[in-house]
Amino acid sequence: MGITIKAEKRKDFGKNASRRLRRADMIPAILYGAGGINVPLVLKKKDIFMILKSETGENTIFQVSFDSEQKDAMIKELQRNPVTDEILHADFIQIVMDKTIRVSVQVGVVGDAVGVKTEGGFVDFITREVEIECLPRNIPEHLEVDISNLHLRQSLKVGDITPPEGVRLVSAPETVLVHIGVPSKEEEVPVEAEEEVVAEAAEPEVIRKEKAEEEEKKEEKEEKE
């Protein structure tokens, strides 16, 4: 069952109006429609959270209803407070179900890399999202890549992905997704080097002791004279 959210056409504009909306747990939004017709809207903040918590997140296709109209839409962009991360404004884009669109989807890994299991390496995620193009109904929840055969210093790139039927990869094929890294080892100090360090540290103390003895002898000699 798809998600349907109810909205109203926005009548009041400006910063003060937006603050009043947010205090009432409402969010101002714009629906960018087909043919360049944009509709300013107001909707409940909880409806945005409902979309974001769904399996497809920001790539969720939902229906937004206002007045007597109902449109298929997706989240285009969410504007957030840089300090509190509170959602301040939502941009929606109207979706035509028989027209291809470009979206970014998450990349997930499966399998245990040889370079990790038997060679002591670690999995380093370089790129977690790739851009794809497809019909709205074909948008996958995520793309899976198998890293089982990766050895130390080997990488898996966008060009290594086999996309689902009806999906075209847009991201550059040479974009690295996952790399099997080599852990850095702490350099061990050789025993001889440690002894040299100790000797160097002790040397000033010896010199100070010898100087003290010379001063003492000099003082004794002056007293006898």
Image (spheres, rainbow, N blue to C red):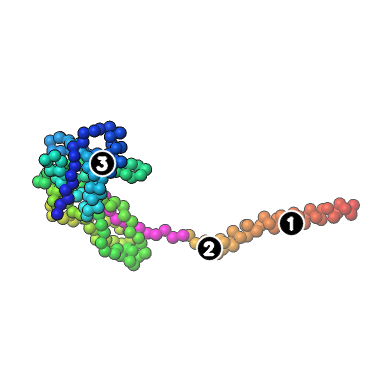
The residue at the point 30 percent across, 58 percent down is: 154
Q: Identity of the amino acid at label 3?
A: Ile
CA gap, disc 1 to disc 3? Answer: 82 Å
- Lower sequence index among marks 3 and 2: 3
Q: Is residue 127 magenta?
A: no
Callout 1: SS = helix
Callout 3: SS = strand
**Front: mark 1 or 3:** 3
Which span of residues is magenta-colored? 173-186
Mark 3 in CB contact with mark 2 (< 8 angstroms): no
- Lower sequence index among marks 1 and 3: 3
Q: Residue at label 3?
A: 27
* Relative vertical location of residue 153 with respect to residue 70 in this rendering, above or below: below
Kindly indicate the quadrant of the structure image that contains residue 33: top left
Q: Which disc number belongs to residue 190? A: 2
CA gap, disc 3 to disc 2? Answer: 65 Å
The residue at the point 80 percent across, 55 percent down is: 216
Q: Nearer the viewer, residue 177 or 217?
A: 177
Residue at the extreme bottom of the image, as rendered = 118
Residue 124 % position (x, y): 33, 56
Residue 101 % position (x, y): 16, 45
Q: Residue at label 1?
A: 210
In the rendered view of the protein, which quadrant contains the N terminus? bottom left
The residue at the point 22 percent across, 49 percent down is: 51
Whether residue 47 sits left or right of residue 192 in the image: it is left
Residue at the extreme left of the image, as rendered = 98
Residue 218 % position (x, y): 82, 53
The residue at the point 26 percent across, 41 percent down is: 27
